[in-house]
Image: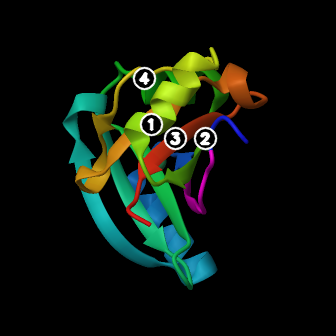
Amino acid sequence: MSTLPAGEIDHVAIAVHDLDEACARYVELLGARIGLREEVAEQGVEVAFLHLPGETKIELISPMDKAGAVARFLEKRGEGLHHVCVRVANIDAALQSVIDAEVPHIDSRPRIGAGGARIAFLHPRALGGVLLELKEVAP
Ligand code: CO
């Protein structure tokens, strides 16, 4: 029995400086279709979801100001992979398992992410340096 039975990868997220320019590049290069685009004020970022065939998505994430975790990420590491998001059926149960197993995590309770989804982040220490987002999606 695993600590955290994960579902499909919902999206991978890439931090970029210029969201408009990055969207245009991904559309041009991959034929991606731009879906939801919104500001997530709580995290100080603007995000755009690019749809590839099937349910595969790439999230482009760009800071709205110089504060905040994504701005610091860009400053320190430059543009690149920011997080991987896997689906979980019940995020409350998933987080409780994570806490019980003492897996390094950033969120102890779910927060509201883009599109109103209930999400939470595990610490990159837990997964080889990659930030992992959990997203509740009803099975
Ligand atoms: Co995400």
Q: Say which mark, if any, is on residue 22.
A: none
The answer to whether the residue bearing label 4 lies less than 8 angstroms from the nearest atom of ligand 1 is no
Q: Quadrant of the C terminus?
A: bottom left
- Check contact, mark 2 vs mark 3: CB within 8 A: no
- How packed is label 2: few (under 14 Cα within 10 Å), some, or many (20 or more)? some
- Check contact, mark 4 vs mark 1: CB within 8 A: no
Q: Which tag, 2 or 1, sits closer to the chain's start?
A: 2
Q: CA distance from mark 2 to mark 3?
A: 18 Å
State the residue position of label 4: 107
Q: Examine the structure image and report whether residue 12 is included in the region drawn in magenta.
A: yes
- How packed is label 4: few (under 14 Cα within 10 Å), some, or many (20 or more)? some
- How packed is label 1: few (under 14 Cα within 10 Å), some, or many (20 or more)? few
Which residue type does callout 2 highlight? Glu
Q: Nearer the viewer, mark 2 or mark 4?
A: 4
Q: Which tag, 4 or 3, sits closer to the chain's start?
A: 4
Which residue type does callout 1 highlight? Ala
Is 10 on the left or on the right of 117, as rendered?
right
Q: Which of these two is toward me, 1 or 112?
A: 1
Q: CA distance from mark 2 to mark 4?
A: 24 Å
Residue at the (48%, 56%) spot, across then down: 59
Q: Examine the structure image and report whether residue 35 is included in the region drawn in magenta.
A: no
The answer to whether the residue bearing label 3 lies less than 8 angstroms from the nearest atom of ligand 1 is yes
State the residue position of label 2: 79
Q: Which residues are magenta?
A: 5-13
State the residue position of label 3: 133
> Please, what secondary structure does the residue beneath circle 2 have?
loop
Q: Which of these two is toward me, 93 or 36?
A: 93
Within the image, what quadrant is residue 23 found in? bottom left
Q: CA distance from mark 1 to mark 3?
A: 15 Å
- Check contact, mark 2 vs mark 4: CB within 8 A: no
Q: Quadrant of the N terminus?
A: top right
